[in-house]
Image (tube, coloured by chain):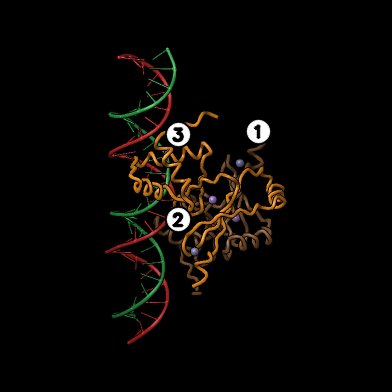
Chain colours: A orange, B brown, C green, D red
Amino acid sequence: MNKINLTTQRKAIFEIIQEAHDHPTAGDVIERLRLKGKQYAYGTVYNSLRYLTDSGLIRELKLGETASRYDARTEDHQHIVCTQCGRVDEVMAELPSDWLNQIAQDTGYTVHETQIVIEGVCKSCATP
Amino acid sequence: MNKINLTTQRKAIFEIIQEAHDHPTAGDVIERLRLKGKQYAYGTVYNSLRYLTDSGLIRELKLGETASRYDARTEDHQHIVCTQCGRVDEVMAELPSDWLNQIAQDTGYTVHETQIVIEGVCKSCATP
DNA sequence: TTTTTAATTTATACTTAGTCTAAAACTAGT
DNA sequence: ACTAGTTTTAGACTAAGTATAAATTAAAAA
Ligand SMILES: [Mn+2]
Ligand SMILES: [Mn+2]
Ligand SMILES: [Zn+2]
Ligand SMILES: [Zn+2]
């Protein structure tokens, strides 16, 4: 519960994530920083993303792709991925608590978090 | 829809997955093959795992860890991961179809598959 | 059975995403 | 200004997996 220290670099990276609406990867962040004329060391971007994640300012998403994505929406929500074009959309529908309860009961686990990735085909990919 | 060609190597790897109940990684498979006195080229294991996955004999699981895991249970089911010890258990509870329908409606996606990873603490990690 | 063709395995090089390290540059407290 | 702690930087390194090209093995043809 330490004070969050937002350095110039961390702030710039945080802003990129906040402005983005496509859940960018670390690579995307580096590219967008460069477009803004900012260029930080490779490792700094990764360190900052981890710092911001640990601080709870952003969320790291592991959607089964090669690279992690990052999300400034920290509210509880899930994601759906288009298998055709790769776009990622928000799933705001809250998951049924009785289903989660049943899982807890069946498995004996104390459920803490859910990372749900739904795969499908998005509207623009469905219509040719 | 071609005939499935199970070579010696592929069959041995398939058996490892079938015998396992812990959703082993490629690395685990290589290790268990060696314990059985079988040693195949690194790439062969990866190729075979992909072949078996594409053939539908096994499933590849991407649970947000560094390495993919493999599962001989191909029936539709989900997984729960213990954040303390890393063990992976089956979640057989079928997910509510009305929830999925709502997601399809909200997002405009045609839902094809769900890879649901639930994180929690397993029984043996909960009791000290 | 020999010859030809196709599929698979092997060894090794390469790629990608990310971490680690040690020195340099900042920052804050005295 | 001096010191200690923190952060950034450049570059080496790691882990998981893919790509390539030669060598083996299997299947098909003759
Ligand atoms: Mn999101
Ligand atoms: Mn399973
Ligand atoms: Zn699409
Ligand atoms: Zn556990």
Determine whether, in the image, residue B36 is placed left or right of residue C21: right
- Residue B42, numbered circle: none
Give the residue displayed 53% in from the left and 66% down from the top.
A123
| Residue B64 drawn at (x, y percent) | 52, 49
Q: Dot 3 falls on which chain?
A: A
Q: Are marks 2 and 3 in contact (CB under 8 Å)?
A: no
- Residue that carries the numbered disc 1 in the rendered image: B128
The answer to which of B47 and A33 lies nearer the viewer is A33
| Residue B65 drawn at (x, y percent) | 50, 48
| Residue A52 drawn at (x, y percent) | 48, 38
Which amino acid is tagged 2? Lys
* Labels 1 and 3 in the same subunit: no
**Under tag 2, what secondary structure?**
loop
**Under tag 3, what secondary structure?**
loop
Q: Dot 1 falls on which chain?
A: B
Q: Are marks 1 and 3 in contact (CB under 8 Å)?
A: no
**Under tag 1, what secondary structure?**
loop
Q: Quadrant of the C terminus of chain B?
A: top right
Give the residue displayed 44% in from the left and 58% down from the top.
B46
Indicate which label's residue lies in the foreground, 1 or 3: 3
Which amino acid is tagged 1? Pro
The answer to whether C21 is drawn above or below residue A24 in the figure is above
Between the residue at mark 2 and the residue at mark 3, the CA separation in whole angstroms equals: 53 Å
Between the residue at mark 1 and the residue at mark 3, the CA separation in whole angstroms equals: 38 Å
- Residue that carries the numbered disc 3 in the rendered image: A6
Give the residue displayed 50% in from the left and 54% down from the top.
A64
Query: What is the crowding at mark 2: few (fewer than 14 residues within 10 Å), some, or many (at least 20)?
Result: few
- Residue that carries the numbered disc 2 in the rendered image: B38
